[in-house]
Image (cartoon, rainbow, N blue to C red):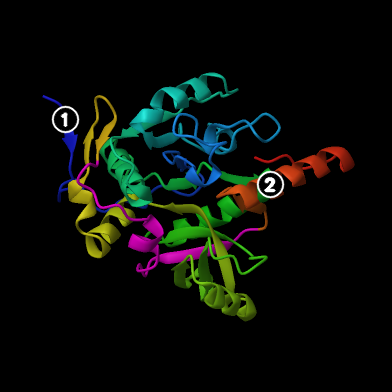
Amino acid sequence: MKRQIMINSNMRDSMGCEETKKSQKLQPVILCGGFGKRLWPLSSQRRPKQFLPLFNGLSTFQMPIQRVQNAKKFKPPLCITHISLYKSLYAHIKHSDLTVSPCVLKEIKSKNTTSAILSAALYTQNKDMKKTPLLVMPSDHIIYGINEFERSLNHAHQILAENPKAIISLGITPSSAHTGYGYIEQGEAYIATSFKEKPDKKTAQNYLKKNNYLWNTGIFLCYADTLLKEAEKLCPDVVPSLKIDIQSNLIDNSKTRNIAFDIAIMEKTDKKHVVKANFSWSDIGGWPQLITQLSKNIVLKHVNSKRQNPC
């Protein structure tokens, strides 16, 4: 009989805090199940945007994988994708210059980020990694400045060591009143006092005037136990609907509600914290963002021999 993971009281013991920050490795969780419909016809269901080698021969999927290749700091990445993209993803991994190969979980249905992230939380708990922080990253974003990224991540890791029940987002200073991003309000002691996913134009403009809002990069650090406890309070129907076959790494989320993690959890939780990051970041959500980044790459390639490559 196939084994299925379902949340229960025995699985949901509190994680210990005996490990120090120095001894902890992070568990990267890379979300790569989207189909990139806003970049059609360049992006398609057979070859979505995260697998297109558009940036110096790299795809945006390869970039987060490469960021977490240091085996002293990171466990092998855990990738969450749609079952129809499984072969394409593995072919992409095979042709990547990786020292550590990822593990792949396959979703039966494309049900947004709450399904994917909570599936990762359940999976890692079943693998006896309750004391391992999860580092969740999208696979369709661009980051310039690996050193700045690592400094921001180390800072977030230190805060998590001091506040093990926190969900810590990396935020970026906004450059415009963009309505396609989430906004995080900075409070004291790294506490995020509010989170608003994709506000309207007027609201976004007001956020910019206040100077204490950051764009949400979609990168965050926390423990799986914290995610599952918050899900139990804030979206109690989601976790019981997820069934994971640990022999085939297949996620049956056919009965799971389709809802974004930022809406289901981040807008409502009182555990949210934020670290202001200084790296250059862009979400390749559609054609305008892609054109901007490709243009930037061309300019950097021709006028700056010491350019920062995307990572």
The residue indicated by pointer 2 is: 291
**What type is the residue that disc 2 sits on?**
Ile
Q: Nearer the viewer, residue 275 or 90?
A: 90
As drawn, 139 above or below 245: below
Q: Position of residue 218 (x, y in %)?
A: 50, 54
- The answer to whether residue 72 is visible is no
- Quadrant where the N terminus sits is top left
Judging from the image, what secondary structure is the residue with disc 2 in?
helix
Q: Position of residue 159 (x, y in %)?
A: 50, 60
Q: Nearer the viewer, residue 311 or 85?
A: 85
Is residue 73 found left or right of 8 in the rendered image? Answer: right
Q: Is residue 256 magenta?
A: yes
| Disc 2 from disc 1: Cα separation | 46 Å
- The answer to whether residue 50 is visible is yes
Residue shown at 62%/45% (left/top)?
142
Q: Nearer the viewer, residue 216 or 221?
A: 216
**What type is the residue that disc 1 sits on?**
Arg
Quadrant of the rendered image containing residue 64: top right
Judging from the image, what secondary structure is the residue with disc 1 in?
loop
Q: Position of residue 9 (x, y in %)?
A: 15, 51
- Mark 2 and mark 1 residues within 8 Å of each other at the beta carbon: no
The residue indicated by pointer 1 is: 3
